[in-house]
Amino acid sequence: MYKFNRLLVKIRSYYQLDVRALGLMRIGVALVVLSDIIIRWQDLGAFFTDGGLWPTKLIANFGWQPGYWSFHTLNGSYGFATLLFCLHTLVALLLLFGYKTRLVTFLVWIFTISLHNRNLFILQSGDDLLRLTLFWALFLPWGNALSLDAKKYISKPKHFSFASLGYLFLIASVYFFTVLLKNSSEWHGDASAVYYALSLDQLRLPMGDLLYKHPSLMQWLTKLVYFVEILIPILILLPTKNKWVKLSLFALLLVLHIGIGLTLYVGLFYIINITTALAILPSEFLDRFKILAITNYQKAKRKSISIIKHGANAFSALILALCLILNLSYMPWYSYELDKPVNVLVNTLRLNQFWGMFSPHIMKEDGWYLHEGYTSEGKLWDLYYDLPYIYSEKPEHLVKNFKSDRWRKLAENMQRSDYTFLRPLYCKYFLKKWNKKHPKNQMQSLDLIFFQEDSDACYKTKPIKRKKYSFCTIHDE
């Protein structure tokens, strides 16, 4: 028994988190939440009210799962949505400064779930990672350092629990399971994954334009990205206290996501991945910064109620097992399915996760939209560019057409055959918005057209297809 206890203590020492690193992660996550609110607020009417393209009466009809909930759906007015955004901002600010940290972490978490469930079709993998990090933070002492609460919380400099294991598993799973899903020839055959990703004009940024000119370099980067995504989870779960391993791990993660953010238009995705990994920074690195010095570690530890502590560990262990099963469920060789009551719990807590970034295949369906408006006299008008003729040429930089990554994600989802219901909703919203903004140039109808340009090898594309996505009139309800 003594040897077993020593082994447990040793294992525990490998996976401890520095409370200062947790504090840094709290600050980073709070800033991300605030940035996300600011970005979404610019399109509050379009995405989160009944006057937008996704009214509350339709929410339960598409994509809604048993157990989902959202208090953003209680009222579809602009004023109610504004009130909720204000409250969300307030609790995010309190989280940033670390005031009543445990309580405000819970509030930020439920506000985030509610916001995500209000409009499922503008979400991306970074949203899942942010939401799940907030969940694990409920059980982590990330308010014990670099916070207004720090003087109240007297704790050890390092923390270990099933929640800290759950957090580490979360970060590792993002890369481990995306690697398992990357079984296509783009990753294992001709190493063309980066080429096809950068072939998407809807995603490629100016820095990506430069990289896109070098096919050999893109092949080398494809292999490098795959190797790094294998290495990151290994280093996260490696039983070691070596500071250089931890620093190398964070450096790999940092370089990978900065590279993604510089070349591809993925919104806050790369920033979320970086900030949610801050808690893995080693103590030896943090010791170098005086601003991170903590002076109250020597005080007597405040007694905690053991039954609550053991209950939190048991619950965290259960959720950790659920997250493992959820990730395995996307593997073709894994057949076990969760029972319906368990699925309801998963949906209620919004533990849903799928790390299929650019896997198993790279999307090759690219293209651009036309908004062909018609006046009551039958006169044609380009509603997107506000021109008395249709500008059908491919935009030079397609990403500039998107106000934010939320609009880009919506445009991407409208291309999907299982999301065709989004097209008439977008069409009606756009037509209504145009007529409200242009009272002297009213349109009676709108044709939403998509020019599909599929990527092929060697900088070639398949013949462009002109697809009529939707037709709507001012009389449509």
Image (cartoon, rainbow, N blue to C red):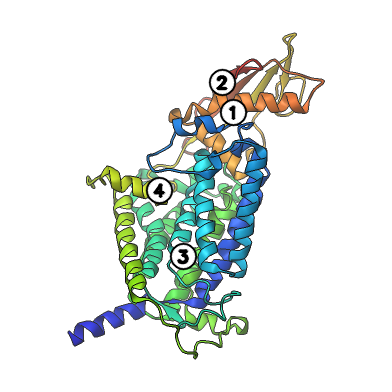
Vertical comparison of 210 with 441: above or below: below
Amino acid carrying label 2: it is Ser
Amino acid carrying label 4: it is Thr
Image quadrant assignment for residue 236: bottom left
Q: Earlier in the sequence, mark 1 or mark 4?
A: 4
Q: Secondary structure at mark 4?
A: helix
For the residue pair 466 and 166, the one nearer the viewer reads as 166
Q: Earlier in the sequence, mark 3 or mark 2?
A: 3
Residue underneath mark 3: 137
Return the x and y of residue 74 as percentages of the image width and height.
Answer: 54, 39
* Residue 46 visible to an observer of this rendering: yes
Classify the position of the N terminus by image quarter: bottom left
The residue positioned 29% from the left and 58% from the top of the image is 321
Q: Residues within 10 Å of mark 1 (few under 14, many from 20)?
A: many
Q: Earlier in the sequence, mark 2 or mark 1?
A: 1
Mark 3 vs mark 4: give the one in front.
4
Q: Secondary structure at mark 3?
A: helix
The residue positioned 68% from the left and 44% from the top of the image is 42
Given contact means CB atoms under 8 Å apart, are the residues at marks 2 and 4 in contact? Answer: no
The residue positioned 57% from the left and 32% from the top of the image is 55
| Spatial CA span between label 3 and label 1 | 37 Å
The residue positioned 35% from the left and 44% from the top of the image is 184
Q: Residues within 10 Å of mark 3 (few under 14, many from 20)?
A: many
Amino acid carrying label 3: it is Ala
Vertical comparison of 365 with 41: above or below: above
| Spatial CA span between label 3 and label 2 | 44 Å
Q: Earlier in the sequence, mark 3 or mark 1?
A: 3
Q: Residues within 10 Å of mark 2 (few under 14, many from 20)?
A: some
Return the x and y of residue 170 as percentages of the image width and height.
Answer: 40, 60
Vertical comparison of 99 with 429: above or below: below
Residue underneath mark 4: 348
Q: Earlier in the sequence, mark 2 or mark 4?
A: 4
